[in-house]
Structure formats: C-alpha cells, structure tokens
Image (tube, rainbow, N blue to C red):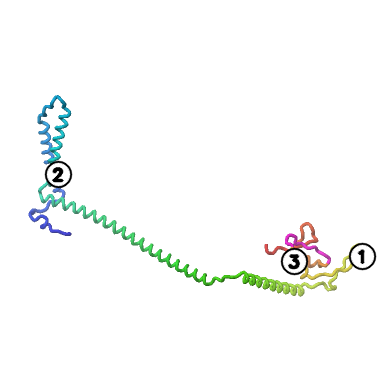
Amino acid sequence: MSLNEEDIIPTITSPLLSSDDAKEQLLEECEEIWKQMEECQNKLALQETEALPDSDPKLSLLMKRLKALTAEFNQWQKRKPEVITANPEILVALGRDQLQKLDHDLEMVLSTIQAKNKKLKQKLLREQQWLEEQQQLIDCLNQTEEEISNQVVHFSEERAFQELKTKMLKIKAFKEEILKALGEFLEEHFPLPENGGTTKKKRHSSEEPEAQLITLHEILEDLIKQHINIPHDPYITISDSFWSPYIELLLRYGIALRHPEDPNRIRLENFHD
C-alpha cells in the first residue's frame, strides 16, 4: 500500500521536519502541559479546606472524596482523547520514523522466516530421499521374500529319511573306495617280509611255533576299528603277528602312539583334534 505525501497532508507547504526535530518539539509541548498541570495542583492546594462537622469528621471526609472521585470519573468518561500536538509536520515526522522502524523490524522478521523456510525445505528433501530409500529397501525385501517362498520345498518325513539313507550309502561306498585304495597302496609299497610272512621267536634257546604276520593294512584297520568302536579305550595289544618294523614306522611318523603305562599297547593318533 503506497500513498503520496500530498494525499496525506495536502495543506503542508513547508518542508518536512526531521524525526529528531519533531521529537524535540513534542517534548517541549509535553513540558508546557505538565507546567499547566502543576499550576492547577498548586491552586487546588492553596484553596482553604472546608470545616468538617464535629459529629463524624472521617465519614464526612470520605464522602467528600467519594464525590470528588465520582465527578472526576464522569469527566474522564465524557472526555475524548486528544492529540497532544496539532502541528502536522511533527505528526508526519513521527509517523515516518515509526514506519521506518516498523519496516526494519518486518524486514528482520521476513529474513528470519525465509532462513527457517530454507532449512525446512532442505530437511524435507532429506526426509523424502530417506523415505524413498526405505521404500526401495522394503520392495527389495518383499521381492526376496516372495522368491524364497516360491523356492521353499516342503520335505516329508519319508523323503527326508530316504535322502539321509542315500547319503549314508554314498559315505559307505566312499569309505570302501578309500580303504581299497589304501590297501592297494600299502600292498604295493609295504609288502610282508620275503621269508613267507612268518617269524621265529626264541626263548631259552628253544624254538617256538612260527607266528603268521599280518600286513600293515590289517594293522591300520585294527587301529581304526578300535578307535571308532571303543573310543574310550582305543588301544590294541601288540602281538607276535605284528612285524616290528611296521610298528616302529607307525610310531616314528606319529601315526600311532604307545600307551603311557604299557609299551605293548598302541592306539591311532587323533588326527581330527
């Protein structure tokens, strides 16, 4: 809303006063009015007080004060507010100063609101981006869940038992293949002695019956069976059928271990520990 100064005060022909000059003139007028009020109060104080009746002076004094206050109240009710000064130049200068202050305050408020709006817009953009990312994540999870649900196969007890049985058969077949390959390897590289696989044991210069030697493969099988079937006592006793070089071979390379209290008993090393 913009108004020309001629529309506001068409009767003003002299140049406008500055705000400082207008304030100074307004203060002078206020001081003049204040002097007039002081003169009125002095005149009232100089007036002689009326004699109060002797019967009840306090009540009479209060009644007079009540009448005076009532009369003053009625006067103020009838009185209309008046402008202190009638000089239009002073009013225009003061109004211009107040408008400038108001304009400055409004500009500061506007700047603050614009800064807050900018921060709120940035925050809104971040929240929208976060919401889109969360929505994409939810869609991805829902798609993954749907794919997994389609791939799930409900196994019956009979089918699970058959699959377990098939696995056990495969393991047994694999075990047999390993044992067969081990036997062929041991038979090729670790054969029995050339004296027919027998040993003579002399005791007190008399010959005892010859013992039939067993192969290294058979010794290892005995150690493995004892270790699996009786894990709490995996030791086997060394007999005359065990060729001593094979026993020393197993002990030297850490395949077998002697009993800590009985050197004639050995067990398979725990390779899985």
Q: Which residue is mark 2?
A: 27
Please give left or right for residue 243 compared with residue 68 in the image. Answer: right
Q: Earlier in the sequence, mark 3 or mark 2?
A: 2
If the image is split into quadrants, where does the C terminus sit? Answer: bottom right
Please give left or right for residue 55 compared with residue 263 in the image. Answer: left
Q: Tag 3's secondary structure? A: helix
Q: Which residues are magenta?
A: 230-240
Q: Tag 1's secondary structure? A: strand
Q: Is residue 48 above or below residue 248?
A: above
In the image, what residue occupies the spot 10% across and 38% down? 36
Please give left or right for residue 197 compared with residue 30 in the image. Answer: right
Figure quadrant of residue 32: top left
The total number of labels drawn is 3
Kind of residue at badge 3: Lys
Q: Earlier in the sequence, mark 1 or mark 3?
A: 1
In this rendering, the label closer to the viewer, 1 or 3: 3
